[in-house]
């Protein structure tokens, strides 16, 4: 075991959240990939700086783990403003949002994660706040109830969602800057893995990190998680440097196949392929058959399989692509020495 490697473990007081934040790039220059998004975002930031105004409201959308939360914090650092972070389900009543809005300073960013999960009444409170920086609230109850209007400071709302389609039309229309995050290519993920390894103070071969990158479902969060687990395997095996062999061996133990698919992906594809003869299968049926929540299937499992062209969503349900989907399933199950 190298001296460097030991440093990974000697931070007993650091919480999981703090560790995550340390791995998060702080500036746009440290954010890898998503070139088109970054270049547009930089333009909007520079323009707002030149005019000395706040950024328009931003909605970040895309599958989990692609960098939405990271980007929200990067935007705050680039604009050099405070960021208040919260999430859609955290608001149980309208008053919670009113209190938060009235505490915002001029130019502050309000980041609402999972914004598609705001209740309709809380959502309606946001409309005048976003448009006119005003907020209505009711004092008292019954006949003596009065509607008060308060002014709030000019702020920028950044919303993040895995599903833009679930946002109501009026809310969606109030975001002047929509930014979509796409799955990453292996080269970008490789760069993220190399940078993360340096931060974690571990040495990893280029072909080893590239192999992890290829099997990370286009997702930085998965790439980083796999890297951390592979570090565990290499520590136990007393391998000093993470090489291609330990990567392949560890991924096999974690049951990640050569395509980066895991047990859940295979179970999903097998269910459509074998139990439902290739589909179409409705989402409710799949959810019951796989004992998995609908949201997880739609947000976590399906987007990548669809992007790879393995599965299609049709009006009658999910269908496994005859060529690609069946091929991949058979590769996974028939290849020697995989599982
Ligand atoms: N483009 C990127 N460059 C470097 N690291 C990234 C990038 N995108 C995501 N990450 C890392 O991946 C992890 C997940 O990102 P996060 O912002 O939490 O995703 P999301 O909010 O979309 O679910 C974080 O640890 C983050 O540092
Ligand atoms: Mg997030």
Image (cartoon, rainbow, N blue to C red):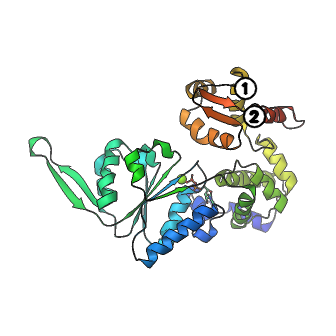
Q: Residue at x 13, y 46 (%)?
A: 145
Q: Residue at x 28, y 50 (%)?
A: 95
Rendered location of residue 49, percent (x, y): 45, 76
Quadrant the C terminus occupies = top right
* Mark 2, residue position: 325
Splitting the image into 4 quarters, where does residue 53 fall?
Answer: bottom left
* Mark 1, residue position: 273
Assign a secondary structure to mark 1: helix
In this view, the residue in front, 254 or 185, is: 185
Please give the count of numbered marks on the rendered protein.
2
Q: 35 left or right of 335?
A: left
Rendered location of residue 5, percent (x, y): 76, 63
In this view, the residue in front, 187 or 251, is: 187
Label 2 vs label 1: CA separation?
8 Å
Q: Pointer 2 and pointer 1: residues touching (CB < 8 Å)?
A: yes
Q: Is residue 307 above or below residue 188?
A: above
Q: 113 left or right of 241?
A: left
Quadrant the N terminus occupies = bottom right
Q: Is residue 277 above or below residue 222?
A: above
Assign a secondary structure to mark 2: helix
Name the outermost residue toward the front.
Answer: 315
Dot 2 or dot 1: first in sequence order is 1
Splitting the image into 4 quarters, where does residue 239 fall?
Answer: bottom right
Q: Residue at x 49, y 69 (%)?
A: 44
């Amino acid at each position: 075991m190298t001296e460097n490697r030991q440093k990974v473990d000697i931070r007993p007081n650091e919480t999981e959240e703090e560790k995550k934040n340390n791995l998060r790039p702080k500036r746009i220059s440290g954010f890898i990939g998503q070139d088109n998004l970054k270049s547009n975002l930089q333009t909007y930031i520079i323009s707002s700086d030149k005019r000395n105004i706040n950024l328009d409201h931003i909605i970040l959308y895309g599958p989990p783990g692609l960098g939405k939360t990271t980007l929200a914090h990067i935007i705050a650092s680039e604009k050099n403003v405070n960021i208040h972070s919260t999430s859609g389900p955290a608001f149980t009543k309208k008053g919670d949002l009113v209190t938060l809005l009235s505490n915002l300073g001029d130019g502050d960013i309000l980041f609402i994660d999972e914004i598609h999960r705001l209740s309709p009444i809380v959502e309606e409170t946001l409309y005048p706040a976003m448009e006119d920086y005003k907020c209505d609230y009711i004092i008292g109850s019954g006949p003596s109830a009065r509607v008060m209007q308060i002014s709030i400071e000019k702020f920028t709302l950044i919303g993040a969602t895995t599903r833009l389609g679930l946002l109501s039309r009026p809310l969606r229309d109030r975001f002047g800057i929509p930014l979509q995050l796409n799955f990453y290519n292996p080269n970008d993920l490789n760069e993220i893995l190399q940078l993360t390894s340096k931060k974690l103070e571990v040495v990893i071969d280029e072909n080893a990190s590239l192999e992890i990158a290829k099997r990370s479902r286009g997702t930085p969060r998965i790439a980083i998680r796999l890297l951390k687990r592979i570090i565990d395997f290499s520590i136990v095996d007393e391998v000093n440097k993470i090489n291609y062999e330990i990567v392949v061996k560890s991924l096999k133990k974690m049951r990640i196949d050569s395509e980066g698919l895991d047990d859940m992906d295979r179970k999903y594809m097998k269910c459509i392929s074998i139990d439902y003869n290739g589909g179409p299968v409705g989402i409710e049926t799949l959810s019951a058959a796989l004992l998995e929540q609908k949201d997880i299937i739609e947000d976590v499992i399906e987007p990548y399989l669809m992007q790879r062209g393995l599965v299609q969503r049709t009006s009658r349900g999910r269908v496994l692509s005859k060529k690609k989907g069946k091929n991949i399933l058979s590769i996974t199950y028939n290849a020697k020495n995989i599982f």
